[in-house]
Amino acid sequence: MTTTAPASRTALKANATELLPLLRENAARTEADRRVAEENIEALTDAGLFRLTVPRRFGGHEADFRTFLDVTSELARGCGSTAWVATLVNVCNWMVGLYPERVQQEVFGENPDARVCGVLAPSATCRAVDGGLVVSGRWGFASGSLHARWASLGIPVVDASGQQTDQGAALIPMDELTVEDTWYVAGMRGTGSNTLVADEVFVPEHRILSVTRGVQGDYPTEHTEEALYRSALVPVLALVLAGPQVGLAQAGMDVVRASLAKGKGISYTFYERASEAPSTQIQLAEAAQLIDTARLHLMRAAEDIDSWAARGAYMPFETRARVRMDTGYVARRSREALDLLLSIQGAGSFAEASPLQRIWRDQETGSRHAVINPAIGGELYGRALLGIEEQVTPLI
């Protein structure tokens, strides 16, 4: 193992910023090919941006979630699909840090750049055998699977009689799985979120993480001194999905401001320069404030995750519920900001040559992830505020 000095948040974000020209240049090709351009993957690897959550013991950054979200939101300014893949790989790499040391060695021991993808939903069948489970199943929407070496996949844990005793996450090498090409969508086309298939794959017991215990902060890692891997499971898995939303809204702001600086006018008005119109100025200011609002909620929630982990205490239920709501709130405010920006730019936003139409489609698609759902987030947070014990989901 190689222990490295931690890179600062500023340095890691700067690494992401330096990649923006490359990501923008490759964004259309990433979408057309329905996979992140290999140059992007190589550049993120070289910049250490797939090691954000890899334990420092293996040469990773072991960065906190404020840093994580700073980096992934910055990457989304260049390419939504690339940012989404970076998000999912890094959060699945973080999950590996929750497993026992033996598993961490298998994944990162020889290659700290080993990338992990994952799907939490337990869409599989299992049977118990000596030393583990034999797993068969299909897992859709496996973002980053085209660039991963391992997959963490939701399974029902069963006993010898076939009765389910737990819900787990099975860590399986990608060469033991099949990738079905099923990701044909309107937005986030480059994420390669295809379907993973397992057919009678043996998973040893040590590579099965209890999701039920994990939701309560009970992780099997022996390295309990590492604060990052004490972070609350569901708040982490939810909140990281909001990072690209803020970045995509900022990407829209970048495009519109550049267009206004070139002297874009407003058709069928006397405004030869749209920037001189009070309506443009007000809409631009409102969009900027919505982006700021989204970012402030994003970082408050990240601070909650980081601070509770740092003090070695598991985040209280009500706070975890609020983080779920914050995630949806960030997505809503980011969408509203982009909607205003599209109105400023006008119908030309939807020209195929305009990056705004891709940014819009990526955000509309990514922000509809089931865990982000603002209505469900509000419902579960409202129940928590009222002390109603019966909840709408165990994922809090």
Image: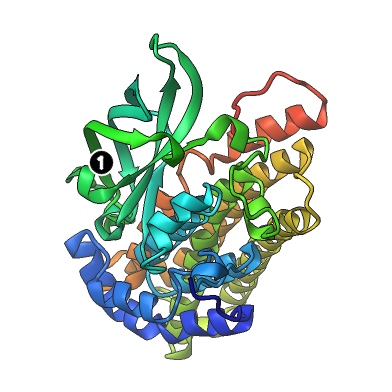
Q: Is residue 300 above or below residue 157?
A: below
Q: Nearer the viewer, residue 256 or 308?
A: 308
Residue 264: x, y in percent?
Answer: 42, 84
Horizontal side of residue 396 vs 171, given as left or right = right
Can you name the residue that lies furthest to the top here? 161
Query: Which of these two is toward me, 285 or 83?
Result: 83
Image location of residue 31, percent across then percent down: 24, 63
Q: Secondary structure at mark 1?
A: strand
**Vertical placement of 8 versus 161: above or below?**
below
- Identified at 66% across, 51% down, the residue is 231
Q: Can the viewer see residue 84?
A: no
Which is nearer the eye, 86 or 255?
Answer: 86
Question: Three-letter amino acid code at disc 1?
Answer: Thr
Q: Residue at x 38, y 12 (%)?
A: 162
Q: Is residue 61 left or right of residue 146?
A: right
Residue 266, image quadrant = bottom left
Name the spot of residue 362 as percent of width and height, x first. 38, 58
**Which residue does the numbered mark 1 point to in the structure image?**
195
Which quarter of the picture shows residue 307? Answer: bottom right
Q: Where's residue 296, x and y in %?
A: 70, 63
Which quarter shows the C terminus? top right
Characterize the local packing of mark 1: few (<14), some (14-19) or many (20 or more) Cα atoms within 10 angstroms.
some
Residue at 33% from the left image edge and 83% from the top image edge: 22
Rendered image coloring scheme:
rainbow
